[in-house]
Image: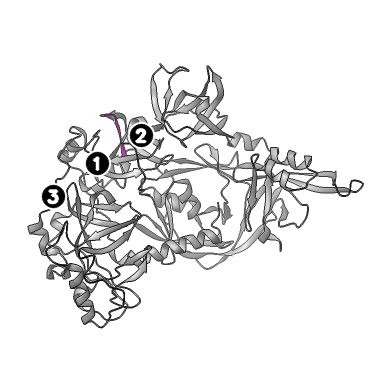
Amino acid sequence: MKVTNQRRSDMLKRSVIFTLIMAMLITLVPTTNVSAASVAYMTEDPNADLYPFPLDMKFLSNYLYGSEENTKGNVATYYAKEVPKEWLPCEMPASLKTSFWGKTVVHSTKAKVYFYPGTPSINYHKKRMEEINKTAYSYLGAHPDGNANLAFYCAETTEFKVVAYDEEWVAIWSNGAIDVGRGLTSTCGGLGTEQYASWKPGVYFIPRKDVYITDARNQQVDIPTVTASGTATCNIYVKTTPASDNYVKAGLIESNQLFQVTKTTPINGHYQIYYKQGLYYVNAKYVNLKLSTEKKPTMQYNAVVTGSDPVNITSETNASSNVEGIVKKDAKLQVVRKNYGNGYSQVWFNSKKCYIPTKNLSEFKTYATLSAIKKLGKAKGTLVIDSPWAALGSMAYSSEALKILKKYKMDENAAYKKMAAVNGVYLMSEGDSATVYGISKYTYTTKDFPDVKETTKIYKILFNGKVCYVTDQGHIPFTYYSGNKYSKKVTSKTKKLWIYDTAASLESYNINNDDYYKLDDIAQMMSKTNKSFNVKYDKANNAIIIDSMSPYKGKSAPMKKGNGKKYKTTMPATSIVWDGEVTGIPCYKINGNYYVTAYDIAELTDSRFEDINNGWHIITTRPYKIDAYG
């Protein structure tokens, strides 16, 4: 799971959009201790007051577009053309902070933000255009008589401070924005339509349907005790209270995403979870619970739920037994035993053995475990896609695909590819590497030259957590390094890494155009988020064991910066095991420590990964706009 050039290109595209909206992004909500009254609000009355901060337009009118109050906050640093003071991006003034209580996250692909909730008595957009024209920064394309109430567009995942809200509207504070290249501008292309690139700081309004809302009363200063982790069995809403209806949506957890559970005894049918640095709720029947005390049996397969209808997970092999939970299409399950009996397969659900009709499962894949890797024996060396032919990549075959390849006389013709497509063929790209556990020779004859014997070497490798096979026939894109001969000199540098809202300058090494950070540094930084994990080093089995959704128990050692020195790096035959399953992510050992990419950790923890202003960001929340279950 390395960052390819295509991935980087995609990330850079996203960063362009991010840059356009950076001026309106807001600082995160400062967490506060939850009072006794708030605890009662969250637990005892699931249908408590949903709108404690309604829109008081008499008060908010002091902070609408163009108000002098809006210029009394701290002015943001600005490097573009000189513009009037009232246009400079500005933080929320102190007089408005008394009503500040939470934040909102946009979940629509393109959301509209308005000057006023409803129909305004003033054509705010026309007023804005007249002011811009006076500055001599006017551009063609403006529509002063249209969109009278439209202030600007914002992209999915944009965050704002909330000052009030009701059933229809959310009042937000925006720092304002100026086109960083040209100063004030009327319009510019963006997000597939006209985007107004300049607006003054102030209170604006966004439709409630386009956002999720988090409540300051739910927020926590200290990380609570996490008693379990959960996996969503479909898309589920996160709620501010454990209400069955009339609830406030604080976010959405996508199917198969992990999250931390703080109370495993349901409250009104809901688990309490730690989400966005606060205590929130999800419907318990759509959660696969993993208890911290669980003793997991040996798994046979990973499988995926099929069918358009929800499927019950039951305590016995019959439909009339207790329902332990509900799963929907594409939910992932671990299978203890396929075809257990009575048309059911045995699965691991809620930290115990449960059952699901086998007809509702598909894509059975062998479960790669550390015990299975141990059976491969001692590693012989490392295979790296780094030869002059590396750009072509190399095919890695499953045992089934290799058998078919031999049947077709090592000829990757169309018939073979059709057969192999469903039997496991993987592409190793330039820079990829794998541990080699065996080398054998295979002699064969081709259809065109039946009298000529050909010989190829077959390398048995561990690639992305799977046992695969690579051959050296044709153009060889890889180099085989026996033993520990694969090494290179790398330079210790300092690279900034952001974990949600916290930044640190860490020692980093650039290997094959990827930035590698010390695994323990990342774990220590993420220990303060809702995606914390623990790291254990199993020297006996040459493995790194990572338990997701668990508090980090390593030493809180000072995180060092790079020193500019060169060190020798090796890729040891070390398996990174995530929740019992071998991942296959690349790992380098440098100066006695293990290094991984922040991108791979973001993938494993179901987090977003962005390249913003030449700095890597792991964003531990991922808002979505898709439909979900309550």
* Label 3 element class: loop
Q: As drawn, is 397 to the left or to the right of 326?
A: right
The amino acid at mark 2 is Thr
Expressed as whole percent of the image width and height from the top left, the position of residue 526 reads: 40, 50
The amino acid at mark 3 is Pro
Expressed as whole percent of the image width and height from the top left, the position of residue 485 reads: 70, 55
287 to 51, vertically: above or below = above
- Marks 1, 3: nearer the viewer: 3
Residue under label 3: 54
Inter-mark Cα distance, 1 to 2 = 20 Å
Residue 240: numbered disc? 1
Q: Are circles 2 and 3 on residues that touch, CB within 8 Å?
A: no
Q: As drawn, is 572 to the left or to the right of 253?
A: right
In depth, the one of 2 and 421 nearer the eye is 421
Inter-mark Cα distance, 2 to 3 = 36 Å
* Label 2 element class: loop
Residue under label 2: 227
The amino acid at mark 1 is Thr
| Res 624 visible | yes
Q: Which residues are magenta?
A: 267-273
Residue pictured at 23% horizontal, 44% vertical: 218
Q: Quadrant of residue 61?
A: bottom left
Residue pictured at 55% horizontal, 24% vertical: 337
| Res 515 visible | no
157 to 127, vertically: above or below = above
